[in-house]
Image (cartoon, grey):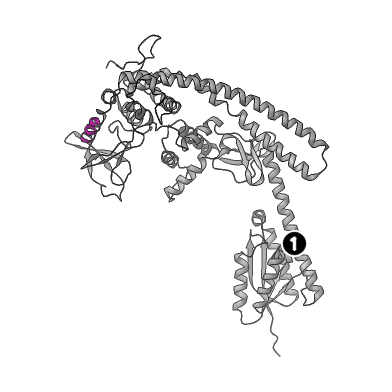
Amino acid sequence: MVTTTEEAVIYCRVSSARQIQEGSGLESQEQRCRSYAEAHGYSVVEVFREEGVSGGTLLRPAIHQALTFLQKRSSPTVLIIDDLKRLARSVETHIALKAAVAKCGSRLESPSFRFEDSPESNFMETVLAGAAELERNQNRQQVLNRMKARLETGHWAFRCPPGYVMGRTGAHRKVMVPDGGRAELIREALTGFASNRFFSLMDVQRFLSAHGFFGSGRRGSVTVELNRVRTMMTEMLYAGCLEYKPWGIQLCRGVHEPLISLETFQKIQDKLAERRAPIKRASDHDEFPLRRLISCGVCGHPLTGSGTTNKGRRYLYYHCYHKGCAEYGKTTGADDLEREFEGLLRRYHLKRPVLQAARQMVVETWEEEYRDMDNRAAARQMEAGRIQGQVRELTQKLVILSNETAIRAVEESIVELERKRLILTQKPAEATRGDVDVGSAFDRVVCLLEDPYQTWKSGDTHNKRLITQMLFDSPLTYRRKSGFGSAEMSLPYQVLTSLDTPKYRLVDLPGVSWKLFAEAILSWLPMIDNTQGTGILYRTPSPGASPFARRQRTSP
């Protein structure tokens, strides 16, 4: 008589990365199952190992492989598990998997539980499966509570953003710390974007890529890298703050070291919202003052510049670098394009009486705005004090409350009030705008804008690019055969060129916001301040002098 040995497969599962690294969980499960199989005379034909997957879901590769294997078997095969928790930590999942095993013509067995087809056994099986689900949910809730508690104390409890790693510092056992060179790269990228060293997110992406931030030998999409840059620009953790609204964690200070200040972070958000005028690029080439400031009239991509040398003579060209464009590979001589551009600049010239009237309106508007800033700052301070008093009263009230619902409502009110107070106390930068002499700023800007053509002819590359960015709100388009397209002028120039009105009527001009006009003028000051030593000198008018500083050429 021939005895047939029944065959079996083993299923093991661990749910944490630590168990995978240590290796003890899977190995001990497999060893127990093999001992059980040997004791019952089963021949183990396959082992399925589930690594780092929760028992509360059916979406597990190894269990599906095991079911497929059982389904293809010609004879019934036993599926051995170390414990009911290894099969599932959910009653619903447990019942579904047990039914799937039975459908394959197989049966479940375990060293920890005896499966029987009886009401009592089914009841105990369901109770144990329910206990496993309860334990999983309790573990999850415990982890979430600890993470929430860490967030409330200013500790980030999730994956670190680029530039940070988890480490130890001072009294904090586990806190985000700057990640050496990567942190410095991100700090430079963020501050550079805020200070307009980097004109666009694409400039930041190129800077980070050139320094190997995205990895050497990368094959990543530029679009993906730009998305990563955009995410970093809006990451509040870099400014030392954190919030997590899904768990009700309001804006608060983190215990980690910030890479940038809150003021720098706000400048970045303002720039992303397009509240700042285009500023100088750091990588401009002296030979091509219009490089990347003029766009292709066919595809809209910025024109670049290149040159060739023949018989000792240098030839310069502008061209579209976009391979999908019909103009790709076709060049326009730099002298020809810049000559056409100079002809365009000749059309723009501001009238002195209108400038004087506009200056007076700007100064009066800004002085009024400065007074409003002082009032708003004082109002914020009073409001912050009032909120602090409310928080004190609610805290005292919290001590005598016993109703859970009332306690929860008061706690939520305190959190909301603290959030408002934090925002109010971190908003002092607005009032500093009034420290700027807007009249002098207007004079310095008008030195460039009064006669754009003369500014272009008398300036170096930086000033040529500067007047172009100040004059036009968006890049001009250019076609080789038809020349420049229609120009979209900047807000200040639109206002100044449209004013043919006596001073007493300027205030009534429809659609003119003198506050926005003044803010645009002030936003250009950093650009003008960078012109030191570039071929144009500016002097601030003395009291009683002409309201406009005159341009003087430096001696060669």
Q: Which residues are magenta?
A: 335-343
Q: Position of residue 182 (x, y in %)?
A: 52, 39
Query: Above or below — where is 98 with respect to 269?
Result: below
Name the residue located 35 percent from the left edge and 31 percent from the top edge. Answer: 469
For badge 1, the amino acid type reads: Ala
Q: Is residue 433 left or right of residue 358?
A: right
Residue 232 visible in image: yes
Query: Above or below — where is 334 with respect to 138?
Result: above
Give the residue furthest to the bottom. 1
Kindly indicate the quadrant of the structure image that contains residue 554.
Answer: top left
Kindly indicate the quadrant of the structure image that contains residue 124.
Answer: bottom right
Name the residue located 44 percent from the left edge and 19 percent from the top edge. Answer: 363
Q: In the rendered view of the protein, which quadrant contains the C terminus? A: top left
Q: Position of residue 367 (x, y in %)?
A: 48, 19
Q: In the rendered view of the protein, which quadrant contains the N terminus? A: bottom right
Give the residue furthest to the top. 544
Name the residue located 75 percent from the left edge and 43 percent from the top edge. Answer: 408
Neighbours of disc 1 within 10 Å: few (<14), some (14-19), many (20+): many
Query: Above or below — where is 14 with respect to 222?
Result: below
Q: Which residue is mark 1?
A: 132
Residue 339 magenta-drawn? yes
